Image (tube, rainbow, N blue to C red):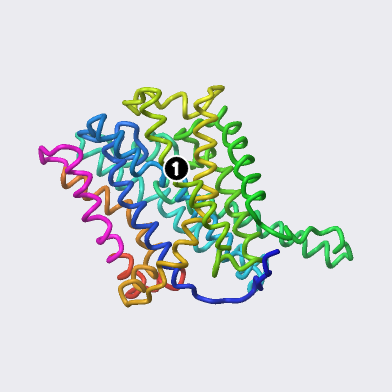
Amino acid sequence: MATMASATRVERLPHVDNLRAVMVAWIIAGHALLGYSAIGGWPYDEVQETTFHPRSELAMAVVVGPTALFVIGTFFFIAGLFAPAAMARKGPAKFAGDRVVRLGVPFLLFALLVWPLFMWFAYLAAGYRVSFWWEFTHRHPFLDSGPLWFAEILLYVSLAYAALVWAKDRARAEGKADDVDEGPTEIGGRQLATLIALVAVASFLVRLWFPAQSKQVLDLHVWQWPQCVAMFGLGVAAARFGWAKRVPERLRRGCGVAVVFTILSLPVYAWTVGLSNLADDAAPYQGGWHWEALLLATVEAILVVAGSVWVLGLAQDRLQRESPLWRRCARGSFAAFVLQAPVLLTLAILLRPFDLPAEAKAIAVGGIGVPVCFWLGWQLIERTRVGRYL
């Protein structure tokens, strides 16, 4: 049995901060690519002037696609790892209030102003003669917040966690402590395999009504809820065993093998079934009573559970640097994540008049956008009072 660690201890872990920065950079670069993708995934695709060649898009899906299936789940996993310590310091009420300020305020700001404003600019650049109000009320989904949907869902999960802790504390106060479950006594391969199966089945069932990439009011991303909730819960459970500092080596290796095998199997599968154009062939995989939808849900579950654990373990070995640059990137990573929307849309709009292939534009937007987002994020943290809330 693994040795349990205190969930209340406060400690900065450079590898976790650096991992967040790396994942944010990866997300920003990925969104730059998706803006020119025929299958979509970044709302600039609503007004895109050019798209990838189908072979380029397939290659991008093979190289970048697997990470897109689990990187958001990894953020929820990390959030869950540190939630018990924050809860122990602050208590349920203050924990919930803190999350409302840090997650809810940026989400509302983006949903009501920043995102519709810059999408309006994109519509104008594409030749649409529409007003800001028309763009705000007519885009689907209503109250879209761009990448800040992540903050919205994390807020809901965090508030649910606070309510659960409050209920447990009340049960203890009323003398019902024996009835309160304190969590698992160990987390090993069997437990992770069970979680993978549960996430796969839940994702498949949810996508019968909410297919992958479907849109709901408030941009709820309901089709990703099973992995988000499961990974936050895994993080909370793993915090008791000190996983933030060290993932068990045997478990890390096993997760790595599962991830590598799954990723290497994807191009073989695509070649076997003749998958050559994602925009035309994606529908059965996105939801419904199709074996393809169950297959994608299973692949995604393997990558999100095993991939999150493996990536955290790799970071513990390889992302321990504490140079000034790393510290600045880590400190400004959430601000960079927030700022990617105006930065990437502005760059895409500026490149729009140039007669260049989509591949060149995507590389330019990503190559310029990533450092600009982190530089602006660091400036926002250092030179304004916003830093105290991020």
Q: Is residue 371 in the magenta section? A: yes
Assign the magenta stretch its main secondary structure. Answer: helix
Name the residue beneath numbered marker 1. 143
Residue 269 image offset from top left, x and y in percent: 41, 30
Image quarter where the C terminus lies is: bottom left
Neighbours of disc 1 within 10 Å: few (<14), some (14-19), many (20+): many
The three-letter code of the residue at mark 1 reads Leu
* Helix, strand or loop at mark 1: loop
Q: Residue at x 53, y 35 (%)?
A: 297
Q: Residue at x 40, y 27 (%)?
A: 282
Q: Residue at x 41, y 34 (%)?
A: 140
> Depth check: 32 or 255 in front?
255
Residue 70 image offset from top left, x and y in percent: 47, 47
Q: Residue at x 60, y 43 (%)?
A: 196
Q: Where is 320 relative to 118, above or below?
A: below
Q: Where is 279 relative to 315, above or below?
A: above
Asked if residue 96 lies left or right of residue 60, the reply is right
Image quarter where the N terminus lies is: bottom right
Query: Which image quadrant for residue 158?
Result: bottom right
Span highlighted in magenta in the image: 352-375
